[in-house]
Image (cartoon, coloured by chain):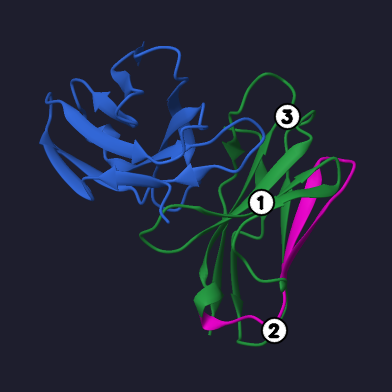
Amino acid sequence: ETGVTQSPTHLIKTRGQQVTLRCSSQSGHNTVSWYQQALGQGPQFIFQYYREEENGRGNFPPRFSGLQFPNYSSELNVNALELDDSALYLCASNPMGGGTDTQYFGPGTRLTVL
Amino acid sequence: QQQVKQSPQSLIVQKGGISIINCAYENTAFDYFPWYQQFPGKGPALLIAIRPDVSEKKEGRFTISFNKSAKQFSLHIMDSQPGDSATYFCASTYTGNQFYFGTGTSLTVIP
């Protein structure tokens, strides 16, 4: 186990709705990254947060936003859901500055948009 | 532009055989190359990782071979077991940056 938890496990939404996904990182891991993994594909980087500030963003539109909290938890918010947003959403944490680049992934949230 | 290219897409190996998965990367600034194993319905789990200052790293039945000049690295699974059946992803990154993942290799080990 990586010590990274995500909720909910599964979620079904309809097109146009908004969704919030949650992640709890390991204690001491001040960096969290979010990834989207479409079926049969590798994870695609959405953005990274370091010390509660966005620290890099992939090729995703602004309707994908995030928050990181001091207690090592974070959120991914997606507005105006589209059918193509259906995917497994993964968060990964790592102790930036700890001499390692290893990212520890949570089990993911499976989002289905109808 | 795809930063990391992975092959093959799928692989079937007999129990006890060697499984080999290959990756090639574009960015010479990359300095960390992990392999992740993912079972259905689960998040990726770190299997083994290498930095470019060594050409090979072995952990149990898993070995990474790294060729810096060719910008390629590979995962070798020795004595493959049915429990190794999973999807494997290579990734590349440099310190503090995002991870770029390959498209994955579905490995099936036949008893």
- Which mark is in front, 1 or 3? 3
Residue B90: image quadrant is top left
Instruction: Give the colour chain B carries in the figure.
Output: blue
Q: Circle 2 is placed at which residue position?
A: A17
**A60 in relation to A80, above or below:** above
Residue B37: image quadrant is top left
**A102 in relation to B104, above or below:** above
**A7 in relation to B71, above or below:** below
Q: Quadrant of the N terminus of chain A?
A: top right
Q: Amino acid at mark 3?
A: Met
Q: Which residues are magenta?
A: A64-83
Q: Is residue B111 visible?
A: no
Q: Is residue A44 left or right of residue B75?
A: right
Q: Amino acid at mark 2?
A: Gln
Q: Circle 3 is placed at which residue position?
A: A96
Question: Residue B84 lies in magenta, yes or no?
Answer: no
Q: Amino acid at mark 1?
A: Gln
